Image (cartoon, coloured by chain):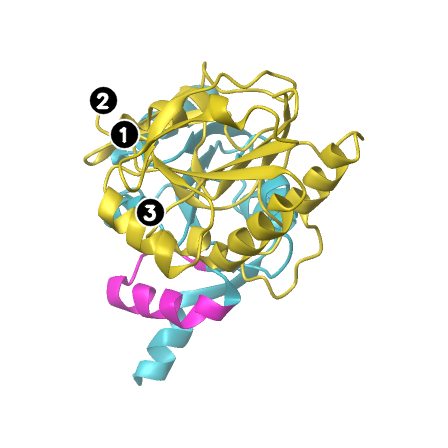
Amino acid sequence: MSLARLAVIATVGLAVALPAAGAVAIGEKLQPFKLNDATGKTVDLAGLQGKKAVVLMFIATQCPVSNAYNERMAALSHEYAAKGVAFVGINSNRQESVEEIAGHAAQHGFAFPVLKDVGNVQADHFGAQVTPEIYVYDQGWVLRYHGRIDDDRSGANVKSQDLRNALDAVLAGKAVPVAETKAFGCTIKRVAQ
Amino acid sequence: MSPLLLLAAVLAGQLDGAGVGRTVAAHRGRPVVVTLWATWCEPCVKEFPELAALARERKDVAFVSVSIDEESDRSTVEKFLSQRRPPFPVYMKAPGPDQAFIDGVDREWSGVVPATLVYDRDGRRVALLQGEHTRADIEKALARTQAAAR
């Protein structure tokens, strides 16, 4: 069972849970998209072709759970960049501005771009529901992992480094041991429907 | 009553996934509404007063609330509850892996909060509301527990 089987459409005081018809599934190919980063520059995911893996991370600036992972995201992206892996952050929260995203990325030393998903179009496409929520694609742009970064929000008692395990498996050309995990996180704040 | 005693009164204890199931089972004979939430979850905080109001009206229904805040945020949870004084027991998620808790509560629950599970008098889960929902949504689910009882 994936973390993102439902799309939650939040309005002011009202939310409706709908089956996420557009949610991506393990084994599906990535459909490249373009979004602006926090500086306003357009980033085309097609430009990442050739990377050994691509990690898409739905993240937030205000969510305590996402923020608890800031250091871990920065460290992982740094470590795996040297191994040919591209990390991309995506912010789909309606209330978090590009200025806030840029400041947050700089404050936490993110070396990866953080893209602004205006209108939560990509969150809807992926079926992403919370932050942080991770999608790992291999060199052939096939989805190999979806879920959490690890199994401990606090970082003090991590027993299962799920994102790291997935990347190591993908880079070694092996099956990802656990392709889907669940995690708690903050609901992505979508635009009113 | 001292402020310390007031704080002590608002948290009912800790529950793991199986503990949530046992708590539901203990209310056999009444519909049960289980809500999973966190103090850092904006929609959870928003729907909390509606849920409390519903619980005050529906004495025929057992309400059980479980915060998934980390143990390190216990004082935040206690402060939140001492300000709102909900009419139902509020537990904290017992320390342990998130996934085990999520699956222990309900394998169909994605882990998103808020989440509301509604059970009929026989302990059968009749609704799983994931994400922000209104009081009307919960009442609709409770109506289904009555239909199931007929």
Q: Tell me the tag on residue B44.
A: 3
| Front-lying residue, A109 or B41 | A109
Which residues lie in the magenta part?
B72-90
- Which chain letter matches label 3? B
To the question of a shared chain for discs 3 and 1, the answer is no
- Residue most extreme to the left: A12
Point 31% across, 82% down: residue: B3
Q: Residue A27 at what x, y percent from top left?
A: 65, 18
Which color has been applied to chain B in this rendered view? cyan
Q: Residue A115 at what x, y percent from top left?
A: 36, 36
Point 53% across, 28% down: residue: A48
Q: Which chain is yellow?
A: A
Q: In the rendered structure, does residue A91 fall within the stretch colored magenta?
A: no
Regarding residue B45, the answer to whether it shows in the image is: no
Q: Is residue B114 above or below residue A53?
A: below
Q: Nearer the viewer, mark 3 or mark 2?
A: 2
> Which residue is disc 1 drawn over?
A118
> Which residue is disc 2 drawn over?
A193
Sequence-earlier tag: 2 or 1 = 1
Position of the C terminus of chain B, as image quadrant, is: top left
Q: CA distance from mark 3 to mark 2?
A: 20 Å
Label 2 close to label 1 by CB (< 8 Å): no
Q: Residue A111 at what x, y percent from top left?
A: 47, 50
For badge 3, the amino acid type reads Cys
To the question of a shared chain for discs 2 and 1, the answer is yes
Q: Is residue A105 above or below residue B74?
A: above
Q: Is residue A74 above or below residue B82?
A: above
